[in-house]
Amino acid sequence: MQTGECVVRIDRTQVAFFMLCSLAMTAGAIWLHFLPAEFAHKPLWYLRAVGVIGAAFFGLCTLVIGARLFQRQPALVIDDEGIVDRTTYVSGGRINWSQMRGARLVWRQKFIVIDVHDPRHFIDRGNFLLRWLKAANARLVGSPVALGMSGLDTRADQVLGAIQRYFDRAMARRVSPPT
């Protein structure tokens, strides 16, 4: 029985703002690296190190945000089968309702945590960095699956409400067979 789907898209204006901020931080780190000695208030080796680390970190952030800015697929799809998560670099992919225990908001509505029955199944997906980040998610919020709400065109409480409605409907179908 198909009842439709709920699609959450990226807010391109907000993501473009994040991109500009990331570019500014990258430029600032590069400027710090090449700061002339006469303007330095700290040892030059320290400024050079901070500049290199900052340029590498914010440069990587710029690439990740840039990829998100041009992403054509919806960030989040909620349907009768479950959730397709593409909200962050560490996204959970397809999460079926049968794999979930529930969902909740954390950190002032910046993330929706999806509590799953088998966290190891989600932690073991992907390369070394993704596995490490998902394990860190599990330690921080209690689950390897956290939907990032920043940069999306829908408020977190609305998304959580949709997830709970679809989840409740799926659980009701599991408990009572169709007549």
Image (cartoon, rainbow, N blue to C red):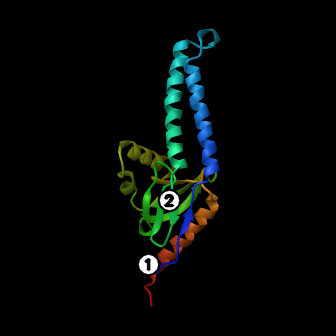
The residue shown at (52%, 60%) is 76
Measured as percent of width and height from the top left, residue 155 is found at 64, 58
Q: Secondary structure at mark 2?
A: strand
Q: Name the disc covering residue 146, or none.
A: none
Q: Amino acid at mark 1?
A: Arg
Q: Residues within 10 Å of mark 2 (few under 14, many from 20)?
A: many
The residue shown at (50%, 40%) is 63
Q: Secondary structure at mark 1?
A: helix
Q: Residues within 10 Å of mark 1 (few under 14, many from 20)?
A: few
- Towards the viewer: 81 or 15: 15
Measured as percent of width and height from the top left, residue 29 is found at 57, 26
| Residue 163 visible in the current orientation | no
Residue behind mark 1: 174
Q: Is residue 57 above or below residue 10?
A: above
Measured as percent of width and height from the top left, residue 111 is found at 57, 53
Residue behind mark 2: 114
The extreme top residue here reads 38
Q: Where the C terminus falls, by quadrant? A: bottom left
Measured as percent of width and height from the top left, residue 120 is found at 37, 54
Residue 128 sits in quarter: top left
Alpha carbon distance from label 1 to label 2: 19 Å
Q: Is residue 98 above or below residue 112?
A: below
Q: Amino acid at mark 2?
A: Ile
Q: Is residue 176 left or right of residue 22?
A: left
Decide which of tag 1 and tag 2 comes sooner along the chain.
Answer: 2
